[in-house]
Image (cartoon, rainbow, N blue to C red):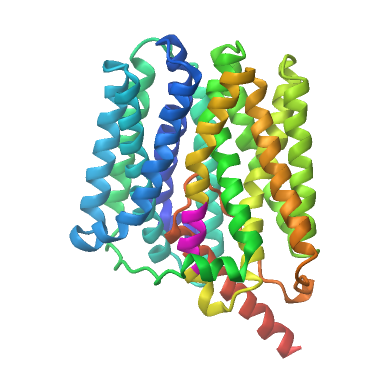
Amino acid sequence: MIQVLKSAWALLLGMGLLMIGNGMQGTLLGVRGQIEGFGTFEMSIVMSAYFVGFLGGSQMAPGMIRRVGHVRVFAALASLISAVLILYPTFAQVWVWTLGRVLIGFCFSAVYVTAESWLNNASTNENRGQSLSLYMIVQTLGIVAAQGLMLAADPSGYVLFVIPSVLVSLAITPILLSITPTPAFDTTKPMSLPRLARQSPLGCVGMFLLGGIFAAQFGMSSVYGTLAGLSVGQISTFVALFFVGAVLTQYPIGWLSDRMGRRILVIGVSTIGICGAVLGILMGDDFAMLLVAAFIVGGMSNPLYSLLIAHTNDFLDYDDMAAASGGLVFINGLGAITGPLITGWLMDQIGPPGFFMFIAMLFGALGGYAAYRNTRRNAVAVEETGSYVVLTPAATTAVGMEIAQEYAIETDQQDADEQNAT
């Protein structure tokens, strides 16, 4: 762990600041949108735009890095993020915010690709797992810390937009000054989506549905809070609980994943997620119960991301795992684009409960499809399944997933070598 911190402290610090900025702007726009008089569906368009940009950035970033290099891409896009954050309160119009969210989503995605390739270069076979774990922990803690900063000033003013702008600007400094040399950049040729769907139907369908679940909670939770009449402090706490739940349940679910059938676990986790969403529907007027609902939903949805990747890998050869990364991220991104739009429409039709209703429906569809697939193909024996690697959909690109796939392959091969030795 010490070796990881020595080699990648600047990257981790920079990513922590970036995640604080990203987490803060998402919550802030939901609150400020109500102050500006934007409708719920208008805000859903704004929030969905981020995922449109994110998906585009993850596809275009590799080419940009090859043409001009990591340093220029990272500096240029981080500067653009900082500028857009300042423009939000200056031009409070739906179309401006929508365009700004597309740009910010694109920039953050490309910045993550750059950072993740640097992370891979700074890691060795011996510490890649620790590096990946620290990276994911920093991401999640950054989003949680961002919710606390929401209380630093009045959301109707400029200060809360200045803070993430400054943090994003500061995030560039340690990364660009401390990490040398910049790594060569290359990505694996992606697997075609039809082939990926044939290899793991549940992995593909599950990633699409999970994209909708995560985008709803990441993009629309603050909009839900304003519509439900929560204070800024309550909204911040509500949003934070989704990610606190994610941190605390990843490793227990990962432990179970390596010891029981993964389809059964997907069904069980989805069922618990439904219960959390139903609790939010029925007890949304009780703030304490609302926090419990957020904890359960976040605690089930985030580990499902890693679980579905591990399930997909169970049906892939080692040579195909890295190639499948881009397809899984792309499918998840398509689902993420639709999540805020449908959530916003439902909340327009039936009020705040529409937020949790949409999440419950997607959990139900995911668990139901897992149950159906359990009748169509025999599960892989537990002793033959691959490793579960912790990932989060908050900021994982195809590059980050490739790192995780490489680590899973290395871990599985080491385990096999140890078994053969005994």
Q: Residue at x 45, y 31 (%)?
A: 47
Rendering coords of residue 49 (x, y %) = 40, 35
Q: Which residues are magenta?
A: 324-331
Q: Quadrant of residue 78?
A: top left
Give the residue furthest to the front: 349
Q: Where residue 143 appears, x then y in whole percent?
A: 51, 35
298 to the left or right of 78: right
* Relative to 382, residue 230 above or below: above
- Relative to the observer, which residue lies in front, 234 or 169? 234
Q: Position of residue 373 (x, y in %)?
A: 74, 62
Q: Is residue 204 left or right of residue 160?
A: right
Q: Is residue 167 above or below residue 323?
A: above
Q: Quadrant of residue 346?
A: top right
Using the image, determine if residue 31 lies above or below residue 49. Answer: above
- Give the quadrant of the C terminus: bottom right
How many marks on residues?
0
Rendered residue at 48%/52% (across/down):
396
User: Relative to 378, is 272 above or below?
Assistant: above
Q: Does residue 208 belong to the magenta stretch?
A: no
Residue 406 visible within the image: no
- Relative placement, left or right, of 382 versus 326 is right
For residue 310, which quarter of the picture?
bottom right
Q: In the rendered image, which quarter contains the N terminus?
A: bottom right
* Residue 274 visible from this viewpoint: yes
Residue 410: percent from left, percent from top: 57, 75
- What residue is shown at x 57% (from left), y 15% (from top)? 227
Look at the magenta stretch and give its main secondary structure. helix
Q: Residue furthest bottom?
A: 421
